[in-house]
Amino acid sequence: MAIDKSPRRPKAEPPKGFRDYFGAEVTERKAMLDKIAEVYTRYGFDPLETSAVETVEALGKFLPDVDRPNAGVFGWQDEDADWLALRYDLTAPLARVAAQYRNDLPSPYRRYAMGPVWRNEKPGPGRFRQFYQCDADTVGSASVAADAEICAMLADALEAVGIDRGDYVIKVNNRKVLNGVIEAVVAANLSSPDGPPAHYEDMGEWEASILRTIDKFDKVGEKGVRALLGKGRLDESGAFIEGIGLSEAQIEPVISFLTSKGDDIATTLENLRNAVGSSEIGFSGVNELEQIASLLAAQGYGPDRIVIDPSVVRGLGYYTGPVFEAELTFEILDEKGRKRQFGSVAGGGRYDDLVKRFTGQSVPATGVSIGVDRLLAALKAKGRSTADTAGPVVITVMDRDRMADYMGMASDLRTAGIRAEVYLGNPKNFGNQLKYADKRQSPIAVIQGGNEAATQTVILKDLILGAKIAQSATLEEWKDRPAQVEIPRADFVDQVRKMLAQ
C-alpha cells in the first residue's frame, strides 16, 4: 500500500543573497532619499524611473563574475528568443534612454534615479544581490563645469542628510592624468622597449594591472606599491604576490603621481604636471582638474569639502575624464572593536562613450552614484536618524460592541495628521494589547472602558515615559510628568498632539 506523503512545504526564507526590509528601515531610507531628491531638484535635475528589466544587448558589457552564470546579471531568454536581464545599475538604462529619446530630451539632460539593482554575484557579509542605488547624471555636456556641479551637489546632499562638514571629503582625480602616467611609464620602458613584460598578453592587460596596483596605494603604501609594480611582495600571510615587472625607471612616474598630493591645490597640480612628463593627454587632465578646482572655489567649496586627490582610481575601462569619490572621515569601530574610518559612500565620474554604443556618436556624460545602504549605515553610526520611526498611536479595545467608537477615535487622529490604528486582535487580554503596542513601538495607548465612555473621557497612556520610569523610577526629569492621564473625549486629539511633541 502506497504511503500518502504530505506535500513538501517551501522554506519560509528569501533566496541566498537577498533580504527583507521592515518598517523603520524602509522609512529611514525613504526619508534620506527624499532629502537627497530635494537637493537634486534644486540643481535642476529631473527624476527618471526606468524599467527594472533591460535587454542584455542594451546592458552591454556588465560586471563580470566568472564564478556566476550570466556574467554577473540575472538573465533569461524570453519567448521571442531575446535575452533579458534585471538591471545591474542605473547608468546603463540611462544610456539606453538618452539614445532612445535623444530627439525629445533637452540637451544637456539632467536626471536623478533611485531604486533597486540586482547583481548575480556571490553574496557575503553585508554584500547582497539586491541593493539600492541613488544616481545623478548629466548627459550631453562636455564642459568640466558639469563635473564640478556634480561634486558640489554631492557635497550638499551629504550635508542635507546629516553628514557634517568635516566628516566627509570628496576626492577628485582625472582618468586622463592616469593615462598620462601610463604614457610616462611606457616612455620610460628602458628594459623592455618592445612592450609589456612577457607574462602579459597585451598592452591593455598590462595597463589595467598598473592601474589596479595604483588603487592599492591606500592599503599597502608607497613601499608596497613599489614592490607590486616591480618583482612582487609578501602579503600579511607570508604568501608571495607576483609583481608587474616594471623597471625602476618605469616605477618612478607612478610613485611620483601617487605622492603628488601637496599642502594646497596649486602644489598638487604642479606635482601632477611633473608626474605626467610630456604626455599631452596627461597635461589635459591636469588642466581640467585646475578648472574644476577654480569653479568649485568660486562657489565656496574649498579643500575642506572637495579636494584634488591623485589616489582616486575608479572604473578602469569605464571613465574617460574626471573621477570623484566621497569618503566619510569619521571613525567607527569594526567587528573586532578596532577604530577605522568609515570610508567611501559614493563615487562617479565622466563617461563619454556609453551612449555611443547605441548611436555610434560620442555623447559626453558625467554622474555620481551613492551607495544607499552604506550611507544609511553611516548615519546610524553617527546617531543621525533621518526619519521618525515611532509607531502609531494604538486605540485599545475594551468592549467589542463599541468598535465604531474606537474607529471614530482613530479617524479623528488621522484627520489631524496623527498616525493611529485600532487594535484588531483578540481584545480579551488587555495586557496583550499593551504588549502589541510596545512591539509596534507605539508612543501612546488610548483606553476607554465602560466607565470612561459613561463620563465621556479617555485615558492616554504614555508608553515611552512608562518605559523610562520602569528603567529608573527615580529619574528626576520625569517626576513631574504622569505616565497616564484621563481627559475629556473632546480634548483627546489636542492632548495626544501635545504628548507626541514632548
Image: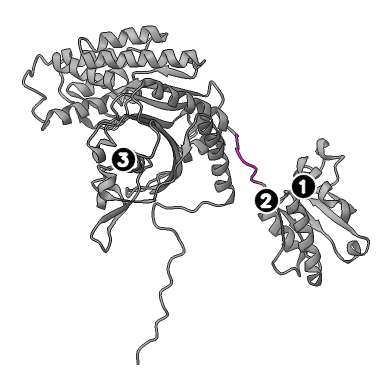
Which segment did they paint magenta?
384-389
Name the dominant secondary structure of the magenta segment: loop
Q: CA distance from mark 2 to mark 1?
A: 20 Å
Q: Nearer the viewer, mark 3 or mark 2?
A: 3
Name the element at disc 2. loop
Horizontal side of 24 relative to 178 (left or right) equals right
Q: Earlier in the sequence, mark 2 or mark 1?
A: 2
Question: Does any portion of residue 335 appear in the rendered image?
Answer: no
Q: Amino acid at mark 1?
A: Ala
Q: Which mark is residue 254?
A: none
Q: Earlier in the sequence, mark 3 or mark 2?
A: 3
Work out whether residue 428 or residue 107 is closer to the camera in this orientation and state it: 107
Residue designated by label 2: 391
- Name which residue lies at 25% across and 41% down: 358
Residue 441 left/right relative to 46: right
Q: Vertically, is 126 above or below 407?
A: above
Asked where in the image residue 62 lies, by quadrant, the reply is top left
Judge whether 124 appears above or below 301 on screen: below
In terms of secondary structure, where does tag 1 sit?
helix
Q: Which residue is mark 3?
A: 99
Residue type indicated by callout 2? Gly
